[in-house]
Image: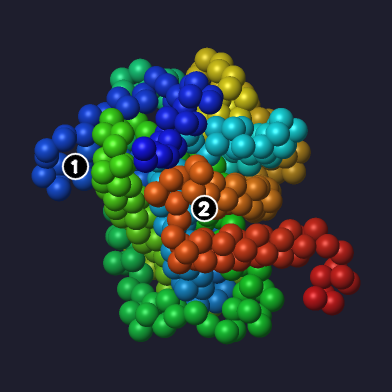
């Protein structure tokens, strides 16, 4: 009698006994005998929710600084960061589809309780830091468009709780639809900005080629690490491994293989769009500010103020602010889901979505309001940078278990990572961890020690 290995999905589900995001789990039907296009459309959506985190306001400061100071050179860093993100999100798809567990649940199943609590706490801190960037970004957008003081803009962002709750009650497809609409709005704004800026095509092509100067120039390396930290978002790894399970695909090996294929196409296409957005911010800064000698532009408000006069196009600054506001509001939708997934996954503990959202948003709003109230609106850029440093601290703690779980045959069965994926994945994880340690060192080390290295 042949021994049939247990299905990873069944084994893990039996051990823990709960679903990820149960209110929308398997709520979207996948046509069994549909065409390639119909199946792709059924799986399309989660990738764009994930891509939102790769183009949130936290990215803007680093992309603006990189383009204004170094021209097109750091485009290669954005490209490499995006390739890393595509690989990591593919592994999240595999984990969710094959095992029926999101990354937070997988950590709870695998690690002891003290480790699980530690991972949960630092993940909650990272989500709060990400939410802080979204609050500040949205508030800046409201100020630039409507003249609302940033402190009041931070408070107004609390109202998105009602939007999130309404969309959740309508169905998961409604959340995906509003996210895609806002992403397309951002894309249209930057497409127009690039048309106005007329960047150098040769400069863009050369910028996509990695340069050894990036490693030799300390300032360039620091901004590069910041771009990486702002691009690869830790909470996206938890989010994607969960929302991919909203599709009701066949739980057979063939069905899972098909689900992995279409979900990976979805996330890759969405992340390529995020690559365009992040690249467009840097290219715009390079063509507009670097080319005109404004090398020190790093603040979003300065970019807004200088865009229209430098380009000679009155609407350029307005489009920039509209894209920023859309970016901030979009990120709040996915932040809510990520917070719910992390709390339920790590602790197996559920609270009402509106309460969860208010807690997360309150943690982000209080420090923003206090710091801006005490030190003025000039500190908003420092808040955005600080949020990215906090995110960088947590990233390795999410990437490491993801690589470990998807590389274990006992958990993944026939879907375990092949050798070449393991090499690429662990290389990516090592690069991310080392560069983020470098970012932390450069941020907190005393000046004499930092200069010595």
Asked if residue 235 lies left or right of residue 203, the reply is right
- Which picture quadrant has residue 19? top left
Residue at 49% x, 31% y is 12
| For residue 194, side relative to residue 388 (left or right) | left
Question: What mark, if any, has residue 283 been given in the picture?
Answer: none
x then y, percent, for residue 178? 32, 35
Q: Does 380 sit left or right of 403 as displayed? A: right
Which residue is at the front of the view, 364 or 380? 364
Near mark 1 (Cα within 10 A), the count class, few <14, some 14-19 or many ≥20, is: some
**Residue that carries the numbered disc 2 in the rendered image:** 407
- Circle 1 is placed at which residue position? 39
Spot occupied by residue 422 in the image (x, y as percentages of width and height) = 51, 61
Q: Which residue is at 30% across, 60% downward?
A: 191
Q: Position of residue 254 (x, y in %)?
A: 26, 43
Q: Is residue 305 above or below residue 205?
A: above
Pick out the residue farthest to the top: 352
Callout 1: SS: helix
Q: Residue at x 30, y 42 (%)?
A: 253
Residue 106 sits above or below residue 269 on the image? above
Disc 2 on helix, strand or loop? loop
Residue 368 visible here = no
Q: Residues within 10 Å of mark 2 (few under 14, many from 20)?
A: many
Label total for image: 2
Kindly report the distance in space between the C-alpha atoms of the residues bearing marks 1 and 2. 28 Å
Q: Can you see residue 344?
A: yes
Q: Quadrant of the C terminus?
A: bottom right
Which one is in front, 10 or 405? 10
């Amino acid at each position: 009698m042949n021994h049939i290995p247990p299905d990873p999905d069944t084994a893990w589900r039996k051990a823990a006994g709960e679903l990820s995001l149960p209110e929308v789990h398997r709520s979207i039907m996948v046509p069994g005998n549909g065409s390639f296009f119909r199946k792709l459309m059924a799986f399309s959506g989660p990738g764009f929710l994930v891509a939102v985190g790769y183009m949130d306001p936290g990215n803007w400061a680093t992309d603006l600084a990189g383009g204004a100071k170094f021209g097109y050179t750091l485009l290669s860093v954005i490209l490499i960061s995006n390739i890393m993100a595509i690989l990591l999100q593919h592994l999240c798809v595999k984990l969710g589809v094959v095992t029926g567990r999101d990354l937070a649940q997988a950590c709870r199943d695998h690690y002891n309780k003290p480790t699980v609590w530690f991972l949960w706490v630092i993940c909650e801190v990272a989500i709060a830091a990400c939410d802080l960037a979204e609050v500040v970004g949205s508030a800046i957008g409201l100020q630039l468009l409507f003249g609302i003081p940033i402190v009041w803009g931070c408070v107004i962002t609390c109202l998105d709780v009602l939007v999130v709750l309404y969309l959740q009650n309508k169905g998961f497809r409604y959340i995906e639809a509003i996210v895609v609409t806002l992403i397309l709005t951002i894309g249209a704004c930057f497409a127009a900005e690039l048309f106005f800026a007329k960047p150098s095509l040769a400069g863009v092509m050369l910028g996509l080629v990695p340069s050894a100067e990036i490693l030799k120039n300390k300032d360039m390396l620091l901004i590069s690490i910041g771009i990486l930290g702002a691009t690869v978002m830790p909470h996206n790894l938890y989010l994607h491994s969960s929302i991919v399970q909203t599709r009701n695909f066949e739980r057979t090996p063939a069905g899972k293989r098909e689900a992995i294929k279409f979900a990976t196409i979805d996330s890759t296409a969405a992340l390529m769009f995020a690559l365009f957005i992040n690249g467009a911010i840097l290219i715009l800064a390079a063509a507009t500010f670097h080319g005109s000698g404004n090398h020190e532009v790093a603040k979003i408000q300065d970019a807004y103020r200088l865009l229209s006069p430098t380009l000679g196009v009155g609407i350029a600054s307005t489009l920039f602010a509209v894209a920023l506001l859309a970016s901030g509001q979009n990120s709040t939708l996915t932040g809510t889901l990520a917070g719910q997934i992390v709390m339920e996954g790590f602790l197996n503990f559920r609270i009402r979505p509106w309460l969860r959202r208010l807690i997360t948003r309150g943690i982000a709003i209080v420090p923003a309001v206090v710091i801006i109230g005490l030190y003025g609106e000039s500190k908003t850029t420092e808040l955005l940078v600080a949020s990215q440093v906090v995110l960088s601290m947590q990233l390795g703690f999410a990437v490491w278990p993801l690589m470990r779980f998807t590389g274990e045959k006992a958990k993944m069965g026939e879907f375990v990572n092949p050798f070449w994926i393991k090499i690429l994945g662990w290389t990516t994880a090592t690069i991310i961890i080392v560069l983020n340690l470098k970012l932390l060192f450069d941020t907190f080390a005393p000046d004499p020690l930092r200069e010595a290295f």
